[in-house]
Image (tube, helix red, strand yellow):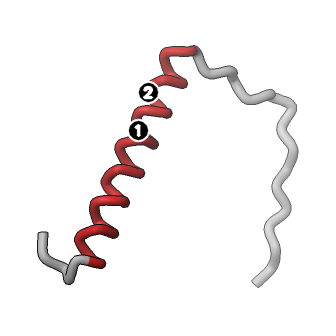
Amino acid sequence: MKAHHHEQRNQPYERLTSEQTEQVIEAISVALEDAALTIDTVTAGGHA
């Protein structure tokens, strides 16, 4: 497989608004909580 070289774009990434940032953080928090619950469930013997 050939390595793909990412072309540098002239467009800078758009800054997220504080509202968008909060949504992202919230989404990450929820995902982490779900992951933690999944890990707890698996280590407890796979029973929900």
- Determine whether, in the image, residue 27 is placed left or right of residue 14: left
Residue at image point 61% right, 21% down: 16
Image disc number at residue 16: none
Which residue corresponds to mark 1? 27
- Quarter of the image where the C terminus is located: bottom left
Q: Are marks 1 and 2 in contact (CB under 8 Å)?
A: yes
* Percent x, y of residue 20: 50, 22
Residue at image point 40% right, 38% down: 27
Report crowding for label 1: few under 14, some 14 to 19, many 20 or more residues within 10 A (C-alpha): few
* Percent x, y of residue 36: 36, 59
- Determine whether, in the image, residue 28 is placed left or right of residue 6: left
Separation of disc 1 and disc 2 at Cα?
6 Å
Query: Mark 1 belongs to which amino acid?
Result: Ala
- Determine whether, in the image, residue 27 is placed left or right of residue 2: left
Which residue corresponds to mark 2? 23
Report crowding for label 2: few under 14, some 14 to 19, many 20 or more residues within 10 A (C-alpha): few
Q: Is residue 43 above or below residue 35?
A: below
Residue at image point 83% right, 38% down: 9
Q: Residue furthest left?
A: 48
Q: How many marks?
A: 2
* Percent x, y of residue 35: 36, 60
Residue at image point 49% right, 33% down: 25
Secondary structure beneath disc 2? helix
Q: Is residue 6 above or below residue 48?
A: above
